[in-house]
Image: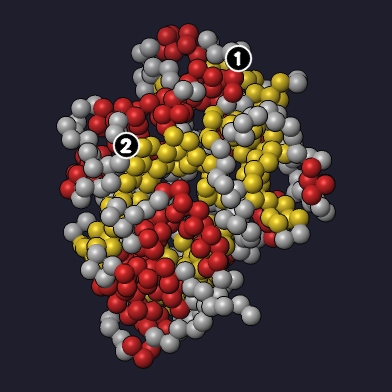
Amino acid sequence: MEEPFNIVDLFLQSAKKYPNKTAIIDKDKVITFSEFEKLIQNTSAYFIKKGIVKGDRVMLFVPMSIDLYRIVLALFNIGAAAVFLDEWVSKKRMEECCKTAQCKAFIGIFKARVFALFSSELKKIPIKLGVNYPMVSESENKTAAVYKSDTALITFTTGSTGTPKAAKRTHGFLHEQFGALLEKIDPKPEDIDMPILPIVLLINLGAGCTSVITDFKAGKPELMNAEKIMEQLNKHKVTRLISSPFFVKQLAKYIIAGNNKSSAPALKKIFTGGAPVFPAEAALYNKAFPDAQVEIVYGSTEAEPISSINAKELLKEQENILQKGLKVGIPYRKAEVRIIEIKTDPIICADENELKKIILPLGKIGEIIVSGPHVLREYFNNENALKQNKIFIGEKCWHRTGDSGYMDEHGIIYLTGRSSTLIYSGEKIIAPFIYENYLASIEGIEMGTVMHLNNKLTAVLEVKTVNNKKEILNQVNKADISFDDIKFIAKIPRDPRHNSKIDYEKLRSKY
């Protein structure tokens, strides 16, 4: 018989062990572990009083804050599932998420609740709550037993087309994912962490370390104020930063420009992921944070981490990237990684022997697949996504990352971009991804890529200024590829979550 297990217990253990330690610093608000536990228990009781019970799905539209984590842990505590919406979500996407998740309750800040008045899908949700609740009787807090197989969290992938993929995380899966990330980021109770990635703060609460919520609007990354964030880093003596490459890059550029004489001296570790980091960008990190260990993590919503590489090691690859692709390191010890033939259709394998038939030899470019206890096994209410993105062999689940790459003879993974962006020219495979690093390293180019547009091999360049257009063209033509056309563009569209990856579909739609 399955034993009860609730991921919130990790936090409750920290609260018992470190009652007077600061759990979260949120601008001018500071809360200890014991204070936070009391608020969570009261919020749990309030939810039960309002009719939210085990198994219910609750959509959240709350920015990263003490309130967000109080609400999420209270939902975990009563066995309800928290359905996360990103701050950058559009009305259309929100309504698609509503259709997928079929929630019983909606919890949001005032602006979100006003927004809900004009949404036909949000109107269908029966219970709507704000974020502040009165004290209620402890007798209301009659929580049901929760098990590893119960759903704890539903998040949506960044895909911009079709029905959103809802990643379903059970309490057991979160425990495995937390374990994998704990091993990688190694949080200590004495650490003061600034986690820009929301799930990491949950891990910190379980590990007993202090989290500083940054003064940064995830929904509007282009408005990031590096000066304010540097003030926070130094004021709170932050020892570890975990964020997207965009965030680290903006801080690094600010420091290198000489805007801050004290470049966060307490900062000892930086972890970044969610988008590719090329050697030129790693050089910025090392220059701005010479005393910090900078680790670049490769993974996805469904499999985090897959592998990682130190920024100093990545720097050594600058000269080889056009020939070899982007080095992302050796797989995490619990992750099995294989390279298979690139296929657009679902893959069904009856057994391991059938899978072996499509596994490619070392050095051959194909699609990266990964398996392990921390790899997501299911999506919520999306059978097509399950068929397209998973390969099941008995109880074993392989996740198709959609990334192309290969493994060398030492077991190191090299990325060559999204499988869908590869360009086939006779027997040659052109990976636009590996040219993006070269193009971005050219003076005057902010970002660039290679696409097949109107039957022409085209370089698309986002330039800072057109004053040196002739020199830019000279440098672009030095790449080991012959372009049929070169287009200059004011802004290459980025992914809305990290503002770091190219949104190829949106870019292609411009032409």
State the residue position of label 2.
Answer: 292
Relative to residue 406, is residue 484 depicted above or below? above
The local secondary structure at tag 2 comes to: loop
Q: Residue furthest bottom?
A: 139
Give me the residue at 50% from left, 17% from top.
Answer: 319
Density class for disc 1 (Cα within 10 Å; few <14, some 14-19, many ≥20) is few
Could you tell me which quadrant the N terminus lies in? bottom right
Tell me the distance, in whole angstroms, between the alpha carbons under discs 2 and 1.
37 Å
Q: Quadrant of the C terminus?
A: top right
Residue type indicated by callout 2: Ala
- The dot on residue 481 is 1
Depth check: give the residue in front, 334 or 381: 334
x, y (%) of residue 5?
51, 74
Badge 2 vs badge 1, beta-carbon distance below 8 Å: no
Left or right for 78, reference 333:
left
Q: Residue at x 49, y 76 (%)?
A: 79
- Residue type highlighted by circle 1: Ile
Residue drawn 64% across and 50% down? 371
From the viewer's perspective, is residue 267 above or below residue 77?
A: above
Q: Secondary structure at mark 1?
A: loop
Image point (16%, 32%), residue name: 261
